[in-house]
Image: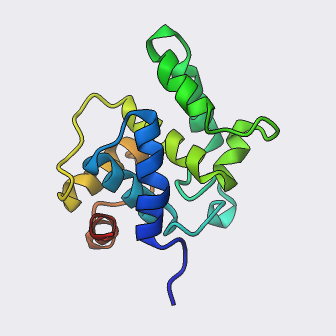
Amino acid sequence: MMDGIDPSDLKWRVVAPVLDRLGLGGPAAVNLLTGTALVESRAARLVQGGGGPALGVWQMEPATHDALWRMLDGAAHADLQTRVRRMTCSDIPRARQLIGNLRYGCAMARVKYVFDPAPLPDEKDTEGLCAYWKRVYNSALGAGRVDSVHVAAFAMAVAA
């Protein structure tokens, strides 16, 4: 029995359309964001286990979410800010939408990667995608590793 969202459904019914709407798509980005959900939560957890603060299948912390919105503020990112805002609901605080609004959670996860100047790895480079996730998204402080388990999750994303 599999737990979580089917990787192919996540990739093609959520991630690819969201990234296209943001204007930040392409095969490498789609695989990166699908793999990110798989390594962060197995695309299954809506809140971090153990009482941690991370929310949604992309496991973004509210403080990171809020910092990203501050980074989006200003004329340089006005178009992206508008595109992301269109994925929100008006009656729920934005950080809380990371839990149940897959489009918004995906969009915010992609925004996290936008601010890194390095190019995305090749779309099929599972170890490169995993290393990119670790460096940019999970960070040196995160519990994630570039190891066979995490690389396998990116391989699942590529194959989906």
Observer able to see residue 141? no
Q: Quadrant of residue 68?
A: top right
- Residue furthest out toward the bottom: 1
| Residue at x-position 66% and y-position 60% | 47
Say left or right for 60 vs 118. Answer: right
The image position of residue 14, as x and y in percent, is: 50, 55
Whether 82 is drawn above or below 144: the answer is above
Closest to the observer: 152 or 49?
Answer: 152
The image position of residue 142, as x and y in percent, is: 45, 52
The image position of residue 103, as x and y in percent, is: 57, 48
**Image quarter (top left, top right, bottom left or bottom right) of the C terminus:** bottom left
Closest to the observer: 141 or 66?
Answer: 66
| Residue at x-position 39% and y-position 33% | 23
Say left or right for 106 vs 133. Answer: right
Tell me, what colour scheme is on the image?
rainbow
Q: In which quarter of the image is residue 126?
A: bottom left
Observer able to see residue 121? yes
- Residue furthest out toward the top: 75
The image position of residue 138, as x and y in percent, is: 42, 49
Q: Quadrant of residue 12?
A: bottom left
| Residue at x-position 54% and y-position 24% | 81
Say left or right for 81 vs 34. Answer: right
| Residue at x-position 48% and y-position 73% | 6
Q: How many marks?
A: 0
Closest to the observer: 21 or 149?
Answer: 21
